[in-house]
Amino acid sequence: MNFFDSHCHLDKLDLTPFAGEFDRFMSAAWDAGVRRMLCVAIHPDRWQAMASLVEPYLKPAADRPQVWLSYGVHPTDDPELVLDADALIAAVRGSPWQAAVAAIGETGLDYFRSGVAEAWQHERFRQHIAAARILHKPLIIHTRAAAEDTMAVLEAEGARDCGGVMHCFVESWDIARRALDLGFYLSFSGILTYKNAADLREVAQKAPADRLLIETDAPYLAPAPHRGKPNTPIFVTHTAQMLADLRGMSLAAVGELTTQNACRWLSLPSQP
Ligand SMILES: [Zn+2]
């Protein structure tokens, strides 16, 4: 098996089942067929720290997963923090792990708590898009209760030039269509396995095969039958199995397809 978890937060995992050892978790992930992960660092304080945590895994090896990084500021994190594109570009270009920084984000809009658009969130979103365009790296987009505005900003700010992914996709087919029209990918998380996600399963069924990605968003959003428990990239197999069932494919074929897609999306070699 060969799986690529296209979105996880490795600095937030609950390592209790792995005797508290990160390396032990990584070897369990390898044994489960998880060969690659994109690890998302969501605050400037975490960019270098995340790279240090996963450093042994930033290079290919025959017996352990390989990790790539994404740098950004989460749309709900730290409203006081003003990010400008130049600072983000400098952080990526100045990083000793620059070659492993494959994406920008996660960024986007989230009106879940506020219920309304907030100027600081819009401005920070635009700065991420500007940085991604200059760096030629794809965006990771978080959107919650804000799909219309999120798409409008992506369209207006030229996000087509850098591409990206709608991470943890839960929106309508209409929003999926607009994202696909921008050249974006759709990434499905454990939510795809939830009982009440029938509409989402329909979207996953009809989306073009070459734009499908899978992710865990670990430690959040554990798929059924682990819903409510801490998540890890190992559980990406449950989302892959649901996608396999929906599309009449084998689990192995979904693993290969979504790995090829993730490699194309991130401009990585598809062979390690
Ligand atoms: Zn995330």
Image (spheres, rainbow, N blue to C red):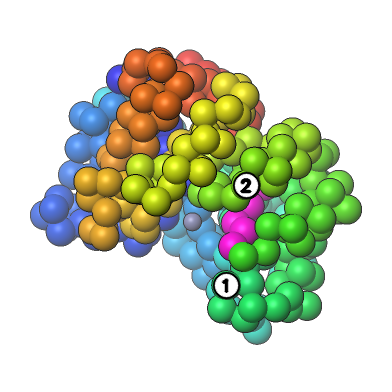
Residue 251 in magenta? Answer: no
Side of 54 where 133 appears, left or right: right
Measure the C-alpha gap from mark 1 to mark 2: 17 Å
Is residue 250 placed above or below 96 in the rendered structure? above
Element under disc 2: loop
Q: Magenta residues, as a range?
A: 137-144
Furthest residue in direction bottom, as rendered: 80
The percent coordinates of residue 214 (x first, y second) are 46, 36
- Name the residue carrying label 2: 172
- Using the rendered view, name the quadrant where residue 233 is placed: top left
Report if residue 162 is visible in the image: no
Side of 39 where 230 appears, left or right: left
Residue 142 in magenta? Answer: yes
- Name the residue carrying label 1: 112
Residue located 76% across and 52% down the image: 151
Front residue of 228/18: it is: 228
Residue located 62% across and 81% down the image: 114
Residue located 78% across and 35% down the image: 181
Q: Which one is closest to the eye, mark 1 or mark 2?
A: 2
Is residue 246 placed above or below 121 in the rendered structure? above
Q: Amino acid at mark 1?
A: Phe
User: Who comes first in sequence, dot 1 or dot 2?
Assistant: 1
Side of 54 where 19 appears, left or right: left
Beta carbon at label 1 within 8 Å of ligand 1: no
